[in-house]
């Protein structure tokens, strides 16, 4: 692969500091899939003058966007349940009566692997078309070994097919499956002693997640799952304090979790513990919006404590049927009061950290993967401002330009896959 230098671009590096770490009229040089040099074009070293040139034609370049919390792989949908919620039933009520997550578990268990792959690929196509180059996908709609393995295999295959960086999280502790309805301990035995060892052994898990909530698993139960993760050397993440204060933030910090997610009801002590542990706060404005929650996440306290804030879609059929990370940028500002710079950092550098990838991607910096996006915008704030627009012009992953999602024949998935097969081993 030849050296290539991108010229005539404005760079939003997200390397800290003010104004998106912007470099006007910049140059970005790529060698062997990594960023080899970046800076003002006038400072470009002579050795790069002979590299192949890509003219960015005045585009802004940002790091590839990172969606660090999704439940993108599932079958069926819960549109009817949405109707019921609009008529007054609560999310917790529906869950308690066997709907909610368990409705999706039934559909996902019943779906064959190809059907599950096809349904999930359609969602990923939409998500990726907005400049997303790294995606996290959780299991948790199988809740038995075979179905959890099926979900995780589909997630891995999606990553390969789309040529994306993909991280999987095992969310066996998402809900109690019906066959264990009166045997919580037995389900946790099976999770810790059967499912986790088998799935980790098959290389299907990058991290372990749990839903710590009154309607799901207690802090003590979560602790057991985390202890098992530690035995397998796997990092943990946590759905923490979404609907009530269950001490999730402190628990995540205790296990040096990569991230604690949701956090609407997190308390001050938990937030301080997260800061000390280096645990990222993942904010999920789509779920807050779609469930019409009233309790805002403690943004001021997170800021004051210096906890990095990431933003993700939480793409899932029940609480956030959303495949637009750009819309989440807007909602993070309008609903949660983040600044546009905080929002963009939330889907780049901080999202990378939330996946343990902070030294690999999420910023434009020498040595990191050449994952970046060219946007037809006047300023990075445009990405946060517009709702339902997609100014993505081109996506580059590991230095390889992907075809434009807007142009050409056939589905993006097919074109992206052709590209991925041509360019990647
Ligand atoms: N919290 C959420 O927001 C999703 N899972 C979780 O633990 C909801 C998943 C669903 O309703 O299907
Ligand atoms: Fe979630």
Image (spheres, rainbow, N blue to C red):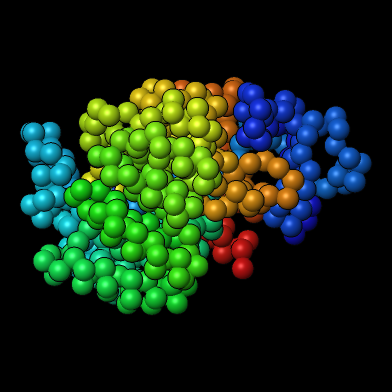
User: Is 150 placed above or below 280 here?
Assistant: below
Q: Residue at x 24, y 31 (%)?
A: 293
Give the quadrant of the C terminus: bottom right
Q: Residue at x 81, y 32 (%)?
A: 41
State the residue at coordinates (44%, 52%): 254
Horizontally, residue 222 falls left or right of residue 260, namely left
Q: Nearer the viewer, residue 222 or 333?
A: 222
Residue placed most toward the observer, 174 or 266: 266
Q: Quadrant of residue 200?
A: bottom left
* Residue 349 coordinates in the image, percent (x, y): 58, 41
Quadrant of the rendered image containing residue 283: top left
Residue 376 placement (x, y as % from top left)? 57, 29
* Residue 354 to residue 109: above or below: above
Q: Nearer the viewer, residue 242 or 206?
A: 242
Q: Does residue 56 sit above or below 203 in this rendering?
A: above
Is any part of residue 100 visible from this angle?
yes
Q: Identify the residue at the far right of this view.
A: 46
Q: Residue at x 86, y 44 (%)?
A: 48
Is residue 128 in view?
Answer: no
Q: Quadrant of the N terminus?
A: bottom right
Q: Quadrant of residue 268?
A: top left
Residue 219 drawn at (x, y percent): 29, 53
Name the residue at the front extreme.
269
Whether residue 141 sits left or right of residue 46 in the image: it is left
Residue 210 lies, in percent from the top left, at: 33, 56
Is 18 placed left or right of 111 in the picture? Answer: right
């Amino acid at each position: 692969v030849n050296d290539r230098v991108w010229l005539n671009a404005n760079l939003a590096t997200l390397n800290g500091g003010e104004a998106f770490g912007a470099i006007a009229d910049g140059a970005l040089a790529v060698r062997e899939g990594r960023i080899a040099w970046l800076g003002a074009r006038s400072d470009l070293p002579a050795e790069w003058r002979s590299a192949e040139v890509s003219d960015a034609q005045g585009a802004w370049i940002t790091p590839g966007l990172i969606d660090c919390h999704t439940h993108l792989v599932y079958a069926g949908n819960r549109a009817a349940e949405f109707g019921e919620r609009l008529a007054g039933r609560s999310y917790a009520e529906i869950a308690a009566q066997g709907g909610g997550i368990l409705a999706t578990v039934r559909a996902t268990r019943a779906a064959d692997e190809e059907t599950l792959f096809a349904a999930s690929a359609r969602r990923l196509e939409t998500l990726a078309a907005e400049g997303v180059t790294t995606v996290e996908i959780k299991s948790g709609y199988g809740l038995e070994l075979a179905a959890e393995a099926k979900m995780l295999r589909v997630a891995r295959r999606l990553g390969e097919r789309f040529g994306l960086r993909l991280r999987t999280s095992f969310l066996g502790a998402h809900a109690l499956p019906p066959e264990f309805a009166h045997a919580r301990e037995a389900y946790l035995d099976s999770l810790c002693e059967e499912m986790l060892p088998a799935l980790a052994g098959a290389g299907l898990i990058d991290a372990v997640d749990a839903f710590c909530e009154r309607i799901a698993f207690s802090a003590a139960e979560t602790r057991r799952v985390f202890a098992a993760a530690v035995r397998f050397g796997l990092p943990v993440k946590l759905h923490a304090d979404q609907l009530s204060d269950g001490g999730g933030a402190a628990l995540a910090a205790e296990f040096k979790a990569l991230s604690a997610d949701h956090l609407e009801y997190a308390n001050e002590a938990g937030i301080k513990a997260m800061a000390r542990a280096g645990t990222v706060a993942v904010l999920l404005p789509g779920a807050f919006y779609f469930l019409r929650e009233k309790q805002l996440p403690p943004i001021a306290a997170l800021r004051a404590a210096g906890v990095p804030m990431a933003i993700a879609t939480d793409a899932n059929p029940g609480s956030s049927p959303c495949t637009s990370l750009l819309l989440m940028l807007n909602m993070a500002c309008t609903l949660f009061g983040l600044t546009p710079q905080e929002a963009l950092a939330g889907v780049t550098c901080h999202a990378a950290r939330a996946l343990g990838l902070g030294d690999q991607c999420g910023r434009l910096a020498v040595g990191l993967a050449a994952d970046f996006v060219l946007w037809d915008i006047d300023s990075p704030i445009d990405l946060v401002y517009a709702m339902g627009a997609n100014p993505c012009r081109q996506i580059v992953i590991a230095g390889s330009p992907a075809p434009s999602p807007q142009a050409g024949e056939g589905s993006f998935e097919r074109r992206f896959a052709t590209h991925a097969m041509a360019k990647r081993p």
